[in-house]
Image (cartoon, rainbow, N blue to C red):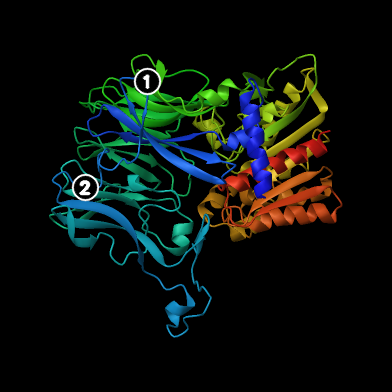
Amino acid sequence: MKNLLTSLACGFLLLSASAQQMMTPEMLLQVGKINTAGFTKDGKSVIYSVKTYSVAQSKSTKKYFLQPLAGGSPTELKDIEGLLPDDRISKDGKHSIHSQEVKIKKVYGSDFYPALTKSDVMIYDDLNFRHWDTWEDGAFGHVFLYSLSGGKVTDSLDLMPNEAYDCPQKPFGGEEDYIWNPDGKEVLYVTKKKEGKAYATSTNTDIYSYNIESKKTVNLTAGMEGYDTKPAFSPTGTLAWLSMKTDGYESDKNDIYVMNGAEKLNLTKGWDGTVDDFKWSKDGKKIYFTAAVDGVVQLLVVNNPATPKEVVSVKQITTGDFDIHTLVGDAGNMLLVERTDMNHAAELYSLDPANGSMKQLSHINDELYKTLHLPKVEKRFVTATDGQKMLVWVILPPDFDATKKYPTLLYCQGGPQSPLTQFYSFRWNFQLMASKGYIVVAPNRRGMPGHGVKWNEQISRDYGGQNMKDYLIAIDEVSKEPYVDKDRRGCVGASYGGYSVYFLAGIHEKRFKTFIAHDGIFDWRSMYGTTEEIWFVNQDLGGAYWDKENVAAQKSYNEFNPVNYVTKWNTPMLIIQGGKDYRVPIEQGLGAFQALQLRGIKSKLIYFPNENHWVLKDQNALVWQNEFYKWLDETLK
């Protein structure tokens, strides 16, 4: 393996030495990944880190840089200690807040039988026994309040004593889940105060406030039954947060609420979209937020009304074929954002909120991209089978020649209710696919944010319906172009995209010559019995498979179940499965592979025992890419 990696590294160096090459899996692995840490204490600069991977050394490195907001070159930092504001410490410096794991429940054999210290067993009597990629061990993240004197801890207090609830929220919550109020007298934290089956079937998180002086805890979002997250105070002390209305619906419309006195005011109620993230303006008079809009992620703004008579309105600030990947914050005279497109990884930009104009501040990957031929990205609109217009991204190979014929891939997005925009993926990378000589067709089918709430919600309980028609009409329409080789078309996708691959394999009527499914749902009955977030399958399928009176659920488990179409499978398929994927567990990929093998259909299984729903390890990612394109080379000849 070491010799192979060394050879790959040498190959990359040789390619880099020549101008205008094509993107390769090895190059993609070495693209610099930015992560913005925030503004410095003086507000004059921003600090960001850059992670790079060395194939030759088989390791990643991370470096920090200080970028002046006024412009100029960044300075590499050996240490960032003390440069960033510490939002974990209260305004008066007397307290700090942190989260740590606290053992609450018995799970292991030795918990129940202390003398059996060498036992290797876990015992459960309720649901939520595992989540995402981790088994429940009986420990829960709790917020602790620490008393400080001279910068040293003198005392600590668990704000969630004896509670079997998590803060930060698992699996993806962070320090944004617990914050100080402006005067440092209250701690706000997000948690879902439910256990077992109630936890597994509900998305109802709430925001709680603990008062240091009274030692009382109040539920600030009592009566709000959906998903309440990301509390943040304005510079003038107004609380804002994100909220979904419906319990059990994780992809419901996400709105910005503010606490206007005792009233909870929904600022984005009348806006036909769903919010990704937000930041207060420096003057506290408005809120900037990001959201999918017509196939891209843009920056918008909504005013925070000073009086009841002031009209609340949403305005879009940016336009263009790019994504505002991250909204860092308001620097006073500019906003700071990270931006991507299908040809470029995230870079840091300053943005003028008055007109949306942007200036690139970081230049992490400029030198690499100077050596590359870049694909052409086209935005098209296709009339769907129900007469509605659907946006379709078409990515053409570098040096595209319309007089030639190209193999073509239908890309099926996951989620299912996640946007297909100008993102830059380090796995499902359209730049790399096109550079390998494939045309990529990526439809914004039903179920994707950015085209109105109705479009987004349509997919629920209709997994194999209009959405599949959207996929097929997209590939059919683009295939009318003379440069699409209709004898060399493939279909690829992960998660819901993997489900789409399995489902389309039974109904595609010889459109495709090959399929690739990564962590896709193969059998809804098995999925319902083994996935961990029951609220998801309850919402999207309509309920349990044993509920024979539930028409929507029975349609999902029968008409929309890929396992029921296996007898119609007749096309080669590559299956990729993560061993620690508890969202779409291992039996989904294994069941599909076994069916293919027993039916004598060309197939291959790529199994990552220690990866979850994604592939996170660098060398595993390189294997993933090489196997992905090896399969396409074999089956789309």
> In the rendered image, is residue 189 in sight?
yes
Residue lying at 27% horizontally and 38% vertically, measured from the top left: 84
Does 145 appear above or below 26?
Answer: below
Q: Which residue is mark 2?
A: 89
Asked if the residue at tag 2 contacts the one at tag 1, i.e. Cβ–Cβ closer than 8 Å, the answer is no
**105 with respect to 445 (left or right):** left
**444 with respect to 41 (left or right):** right
Give the percent coordinates (x, y) of residue 169. Answer: 40, 52
Does 81 appear above or below 579?
Answer: above
Q: CA distance from mark 1 to mark 2?
A: 30 Å
Residue lying at 43% horizontally and 77% vertically, measured from the top left: 111
Label 2 element class: loop
**264 with respect to 397 (left or right):** left
Give the percent coordinates (x, y) of residue 488. Answer: 81, 30
Q: Which sits in the foreground, 5 or 498? A: 5
Give the percent coordinates (x, y) of residue 299. Answer: 41, 24
Give the residue type that dot 1 points to. Answer: Leu
Label 1 element class: strand
**Badge 1: how crowded within 10 Å, few (<14), some, or many (20+)?**
many
Q: Which mark is residue 351?
A: 1
Give the residue type that dot 2 points to. Answer: Ile
Q: Which mark is residue 143?
A: none
Residue lying at 78% horizontally and 48% vertically, measured from the top left: 565
Q: Which sits in the foreground, 233 or 259? A: 233
Quadrant containing the C terminus is top right
Mark 1 vs mark 2: which is more N-terminal?
Answer: 2
Q: How many marks?
A: 2
Q: Place residue 431 in its image quadrant.
A: top right
> In the rendered image, is residue 520 in sight?
no
**Badge 2: how crowded within 10 Å, few (<14), some, or many (20+)?**
many
